[in-house]
Amino acid sequence: MSTTSNFSFSDNVVLEDDLVLLRPLQESDVENLLEISINEPETWKYSLVGADGKENLTHYIQLAIKARENQKEFPFIVFDKKSQKYAGSTRFYDIQLDFKTLQLGYTWYGSAFRGTGLNKHCKFLLLQFAFETLGMERVEFRADNNNQRSIAAMKSIGCKVEGVLRSHMPTQDKNVRRDSIVLSILKNEWFNEVKENLKNKL
């Protein structure tokens, strides 16, 4: 098993199985995600940074690429092999290679790809990469505590709830602050149970 020392933020990391392919997000992907961005603005209801509309989507992608250049995040675009269409985006963020921890989030898909099993395939590939290639000890997930769909999805892949950070972040409505729920998977949990359980759901 290789360790974090083999990882570079400039690597062209491609993760794929029979259903999905994840590759690094790039500026030209504005065109690949524009249809979802324009037609499904509600996708970013719980997001601090929306990608609804071409201008916001362009800004969203530019911010993600900048964060990768600054070695803080690693964003992916998600391609659904079954429909041969781009489905959405996800990323590793708050990457702490020295501490062997990272967060997995900024995940969104167009409505046609929700509930299809695509998310579980993505999460399996991302978690496998985090624990088995990067040698992470902990992968953390966060969500708006009101975002029940997202929380249910995280629990279904094997995340354990750790608690709620009260009044943790602002929301798009500047007068409202959100509570953030924190979940995680630890390395031993991945190898002991989560990996096998998740593989059986694919």
Image: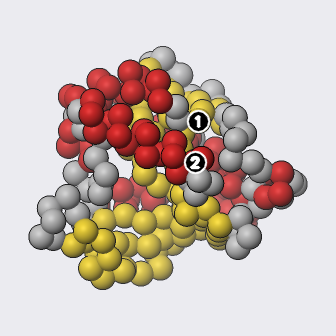
Residue closest to the eye, 56 or 180: 56
Residue 111, image x, y percentages: 29, 35
Marks 2 and 1 in Cβ contact (< 8 Å): yes
In the rendered image, the quadrant that contains the C terminus is top right
Above or below, 192 against 54 in this view is below
For this view, does 161 lie left or right of residue 136? left
Residue 11, image x, y percentages: 72, 39
Residue closest to the eye, 197 or 22: 22
View extreme (right): residue? 1
Residue that mark 1 sits on: 24
Q: CA distance from mark 2 to mark 1?
A: 10 Å
Residue that mark 2 sits on: 68
Point out the tag, 2 or 1, that comes first from the N-terminus. 1
Q: Is residue 196 visible?
A: no
Residue closest to the eye, 114 or 65: 65
Above or below, 187 against 79 in this view is below
- Indicate the amino acid at tag 1: Pro
Residue 42, image x, y percentages: 20, 43
- Looking at the rendered structure, the secondary structure element under dot 2 is helix
Q: Residue at x 47, y 55 (%)?
A: 105
Q: Residue at x 58, y 48 (%)?
A: 68
